[in-house]
Image: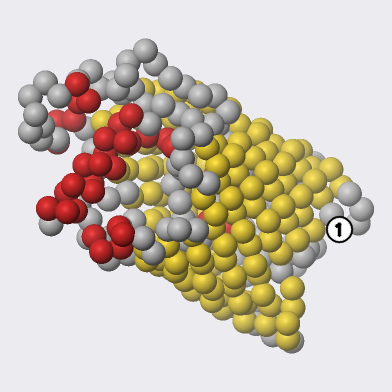
Amino acid sequence: MIMKKIIFLSVLMLSVKAFSQQDPQFTQYFDNTLHVNPAYAGSSGMLSATALHREQWFGFDGAPRSTTFSLHTPLNYRSVGLGLTAVNDMIGPIRQNMIYVDFSYSIKLGEKSTLALGLKGGINMLNVASEGMQNIQPNDPAFMNLQNQINPNVGFGIYYHNPHFFLGLSSPRILENSSSNPNSYLENRHYFGIIGGVFSVAKSLKMRPSVQVKATMGAPISVDASLAGIVSDKLWIGGMYRLNSSAGGFVQYQISRQFRLGVGADFGTNGLRNANSGSYELLISYDFNYKKSDVKSPRYF
């Protein structure tokens, strides 16, 4: 228990100094693309909604807890897509709420390939519930003059896809907000890259590999890799590895043409694994697709 508190206080101190060094991370990151890349908006060809909740480091007091929600659709003029993303992220007494609007414009490259360019704009609201903290060192400068903030920001992205392959590059928050207050939050610019595809290996079995890379100044590069098997377009079973951090798995089930439910879990591969019981996720995805058309159903990415 003492070791858990020491580790948590270390994480908390780093978070107060530079809270946004890494965006929320997910085992099922491939279902959270719109949050990091606005060019993904409208790529499903229909109105799509996804909610993803993560309880990180379960059993660890004050551990990170993240919830994202995304909604996006193409307009009648199919080259244009619009989206909305919302994020609630907590670690200890620190709260972060983001609301962003996403816009994309798609260019056809041949019969089945599309290149989309995207823009994102919104606000990031950060605050510290300092009344819930117990300061054992009077007048500790690290806990003095903590200020809530509302930071506007913009982002961009590109997304290429065809029925069997996808590639995306993005920076969802370009502006690096800072303040003369040494205890203010610092928003560092993040860069994301994702690549993957889907291919058939048997009549009723497809494989979908993917890799996501995250980079920002002042933090190690994060690499997530996953491989999912899709059985009869209904059952998704996969594994995930996060470089030098964790490994886990996920199961998703396509309940209907519209509705998919998924669960995921990962466990640390570093020293922190002894201080928690792993991280767990719940995914709910719904596509407003009620008629047969050229829209892919189910979606593979």
Residue placed at 54% from the left, 24% from the top? 175
Residue 215: quadrant of the picture: top right
* Residue that extends furthest to the right in the rendered view of this protein: 110
Locate residue 116, reporting x and y percent. 76, 43
Residue 15: quadrant of the picture: top left
Residue 94 vs residue 242: left or right?
left
Residue placed at 61% from the left, 32% from the top? 155
Crowding near pointer 1: few (<14 within 10 Å), some, many (20+)? few
Residue 185, relative to residue 31: is it above or below? Answer: above
Residue placed at 71% from the left, 69% from the top? 198
Residue 44 vs residue 130: left or right?
right
Locate residue 279, reporting x and y percent. 35, 61
The residue closer to the viewer here, 109 or 4, is 4
Residue 225, relative to residue 76: is it above or below? Answer: below
Residue 47 vs residue 150: left or right?
right
User: Which residue in the protein does label 1 denote?
Assistant: 112
Locate residue 140, reporting x and y percent. 15, 24
Residue 191: quadrant of the picture: top right
Question: What kind of residue is marked 1?
Answer: Lys
* Residue that extends furthest to the bottom in the rendered view of this protein: 203
Locate residue 47, reporting x and y percent. 63, 52
What count of labels does the image hold?
Answer: 1
Q: From the image, which quarter does the C terminus lie in?
A: bottom right
Q: Secondary structure at mark 1?
A: loop
Can I make out residue 184 in this image? Answer: yes
Residue 98, relative to residue 159: is it above or below? Answer: above
Q: From the image, which quarter does the N terminus lie in?
A: bottom left
Can I make out residue 83 in this image? Answer: no
Residue placed at 73% from the left, 82% from the top? 201
